[in-house]
Amino acid sequence: MNGHKPHRVRTLLVHLGLILAAAFMAMPLWFAFVASTYQGGDFISGHVGWLPGSNFWNTYVTTLNGTAAQALALPPMGSALLNSLIMAMLIACGKILISLPSAYAVTYFNFPFRSLCFWVIFITLMLPVEVRIVPTFQVAATLGLLNSYAGLTLPLIASATATFLFRQTFLTVPDELTEAARIDGASPLRFFIDVVIPLSRTNIAALFVILFIYGWNQYLWPLLVTTKASYSTIVMTVGRLSEASGEGDPVWNYTMATAILALLPPVFVVVAMQRLFVRGLVETEK
Amino acid sequence: MAAVSLKGIRKTYPNGLEVVKGIDLEIENGKLCVLVGPSGCGKSTLLRMIAGLESVTAGHIEIAGKDVAALEPAERDIAMVFQNYALYPHMSVFDNIAYGLRNRGTPRNEIKARVEEAEKLLALDGLLQRRPRELSGGQRQRVAMGRAIVRRPSAFLFDEPLSNLDAKLRTQMRVEIRTLQQRLGVTSVYVTHDQLEAMTMADQLVVMNAGQIEQVGTPAQVYDAPVSQFVAGFLGSPAMNFLPGTIQAAGDLVLDAGGHVTLTGTATQMQGQRVIAGVRPEAIGIAQGAPAFTARLELVEELGSARLLHLRLGQTTLVAVVGRETAFATGQDLPVSIPAASVHLFNEKTGRALV
Ligand SMILES: Nc1ncnc2c1ncn2[C@@H]1O[C@H](COP(=O)(O)OP(=O)(O)OP(=O)(O)O)[C@@H](O)[C@H]1O
Ligand SMILES: [Mg+2]
């Protein structure tokens, strides 16, 4: 009996520490939520405390039905959410669809300049959009991609992260499987579809989650390539709201409500794919 | 007609290492040929060249009378069983077995019939819907066999298929594979470094060393008449004892460690020659007939069916297998006899068998 006690105390302390840390991390979210439940001006004047106010219903209804956005001459909520969804999906799927075959090529085939190809792909890791933003904008403009989904997503799709990660995944597929498939008469394409992709399933899921969030959170690039309200994304709306001030008062309640709403789709994606996602990150055995 | 025929096969890896140095081998239809040899002697490389997984630096390979040089592995009409089974982990047992047939466009009902036939043959009943990871090692091995047999190839290739199994299962699977192979009558090439597996399974035993064939024959031929000290030492467990010595007067071999062994036959005419005498542990007699020398008993190992005696004679040690009728105490000096007929003589320098 006695021997158990210190153990329980320690477990309790550890749990307490973990709970505190989690609460600490969640604090900004909580304050965002609390702020969204007060009147716009209360946030600035310091009337916002720890607990939600009474304006929850009003704020969220006006945010969702577009009244708030309309009053501030911003694009409607629904279309912004849809744009973000389209952009995030295109980026995530586009990257995965391009990276899978390119990783397959550099991993499984011997062709002239193979390692050169790999390193060229690899170097793009060091050139994210933010670094090459001026020339990329120039190219997008010349190609007439401004104010289009292609312009929103293409420059973000072209990068090496996914290729690199898939290559690492493919390298863990045992050589014997490749050889067994060759003896079984599987063409390279069949092997890719029947063996390589199913074996990378969890990694694809994990990458999808990461890339979806990456795409969803894009701010700078969408801001540059879109001028029409019909292509505006939700993250842009959050940005504009925090600057807009309606009839003088900054509308912090709408800003925070929009931020909370903008948070929900990525959270949904993470929760929905959590099991695969975690396995994809942890699993090494094939 | 030879089902598999190898002529002057050589292999040099891109790193410049020549691991197969001219192999000529004919394997008869329906026979099981075992390639045995120490680790790194090029067995797997040779097998993989037959399979088409590895390019051939020089030489010709014919399978069922067809030159396969230009053919892909899938076109060579062979099936291979890998050491770690190489089952597709995400496919059910059924799909694993059926995959090769599907890729060849075999009709659906034919695939089903063949997989079910393999299921019966290999006692895989009720396992067809499982994933490989839900199977035991022996079951995985059977699935790998199933994948090979449904294709009805003209040759099976095995690369150490049993080395991942525990000793008991290995013995059992050995018998199963051999029985199945005889029943189906498919020519097989079987790579192993386990001499027991090699001896028990082979129709034709090929002992390899450093990329070359040392000896080819039936297991009994190779065991009874090894052409070199390497082969003699490689086959048999416990291994053959080697005692260096000089042939003195006609038929009298004087061992360096002390003692005399009487020789018969042509060996009697090799006076003055330095030799290595090889004696199998089971040929050595203890306290029977005229002793060749006396040796000190250092250790007794109980095998259950017999006993192993570790004996010391001067600087050398030797092992004898004896029945369990007599008990021996360690530290005893025992009279050791070596029947003339059981002595193998090898050239001291080249290791080649004399006579
Ligand atoms: N791809 C390769 N490139 C270079 N050298 C290789 C390659 N594969 C094998 N080797 C070398 O060739 C030699 C023979 O290898 P192999 O796999 O045929 O041996 P093995 O007889 O099958 O041995 P084991 O019983 O250990 O499986 C070894 O020395 C090995 O290091
Ligand atoms: Mg090997």
Image (cartoon, coloured by chain):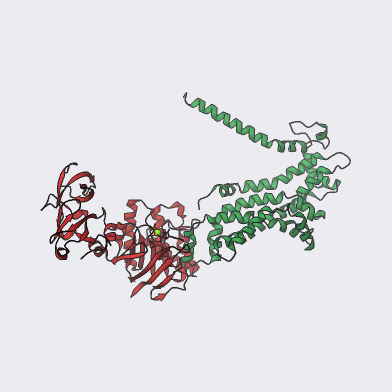
Q: In this orientation, which residue lies closer to the viewer: B89 or A63?
A: B89
Residue B313, x across and y down, in percent: 20, 48
Q: Residue at x 58, y 29 (%)?
A: A13
Chain shown red: that is B
Q: Is residue A282 left or right of residue B41?
A: right
| Residue farthest to the right, as pictured | A247
Q: Is residue B266 above or below residue B282?
A: below
Q: Residue at x 83, y 45 (%)?
A: A68
Q: Residue at x 80, y 39 (%)?
A: A252
Q: Is residue B199 above or below residue A281?
A: below
Q: In this orientation, which residue lies closer to the viewer: B243 or A122?
A: B243
Q: Is residue B89 left or right of residue B292?
A: right
Q: Quadrant of ligand 1?
A: bottom left
Q: Is residue A170 left or right of residue B169?
A: right
Q: Is residue A257 left or right of residue A171?
A: right
Chain shown green: that is A
State whether residue A67 appears in this view.
yes
